[in-house]
Image (cartoon, coloured by chain):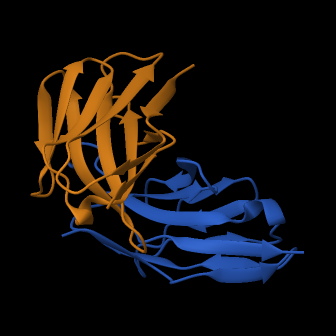
Amino acid sequence: GDSVTQMEGPVTLSEEAFLTINCTYTATGYPSLFWYVQYPGEGLQLLLKATKADDKGSNKGFEATYRKETTSFHLEKGSVQVSDSAVYFCALRDTGTASKLTFGTGTRLQVTL
Amino acid sequence: SQTIHQWPATLVQPVGSPLSLECTVEGTSNPNLYWYRQAAGRGLQLLFYSVGIGQISSEVPQNLSASRPQDRQFILSSKKLLLSDSGFYLCAWSRGGEETQYFGPGTRLLVL
């Protein structure tokens, strides 16, 4: 079945550091890939998405490129801020699955001054 | 604009007691609706989804059930809670045929 594997956290960075959160997936079809973010005490928000191979999703300075050859969708940001502290979830939607999402376990990011 | 509400925000219940969590969506019609659970240290697990009134699909066997009595209302229930039901319950909606899901603020449930 479908699955998503994320790097375990927590990830602790200083402000303005470079961020990478790894995500790899297993799917039977041609999935769409997503990153969701959960700020403290809140629900999940869509951060970015990519629907086909080589697409790059981007939002708020975050980027992720759909790499079919490595089945990966790593999240990157060039310079993190304290306000980026949150839990980040990688997810996929496989074809023909009625919009059902499969999530990774989440990676907690803590950014300090 | 569309909004999604969940209540209560926090709930502490004894083992064996019943449960009812409610989710409502405003500003859209005939949404797909979803219940997820986020257990401590784990990712989100899809519990139920619904593509219309009275239509419920269950993803995992458990002592929970879901109902959709109205187009924009989705209820998660249990007759007898277990300790393992503790977690963070998230409701989400999407437009039919679209991929993006929009999440509510969640309900934190602690079963003691």
The tint of chain A in the picture is blue
For residue A95, side relative to residue A55 (left or right): left
Q: Is residue B59 visible?
A: yes
In the rendered view, tell whether residue B3 sits above or below residue B86: above
Q: Nearer the viewer, residue A77 or B103?
A: B103
On the image, the x and y values in percent for residue B13 come to 32, 50
Q: Residue at x 65, y 63 (%)?
A: A86
Q: Is residue A95 visible?
A: no
Q: Residue at x 43, y 82 (%)?
A: A70
For residue A76, side relative to residue B80 (left or right): right
Q: Residue at x 66, y 55 (%)?
A: A58
On the image, the x and y values in percent for residue B85 come to 26, 59
Q: Residue at x 43, y 41 (%)?
A: B101
On the image, the x and y values in percent for residue A94 come to 28, 56
- The chain drawn in orange is B
In the rendered view, tell whether residue A74 sits above or below residue A90: below
Q: Image quadrant for the C terminus of chain B?
A: bottom left
On the image, the x and y values in percent for residue B14 come to 27, 54
Q: Quadrant of residue A61?
A: bottom right
For residue A1, side relative to residue A99 (left or right): left
Q: Image quadrant for the N terminus of chain B?
A: top right
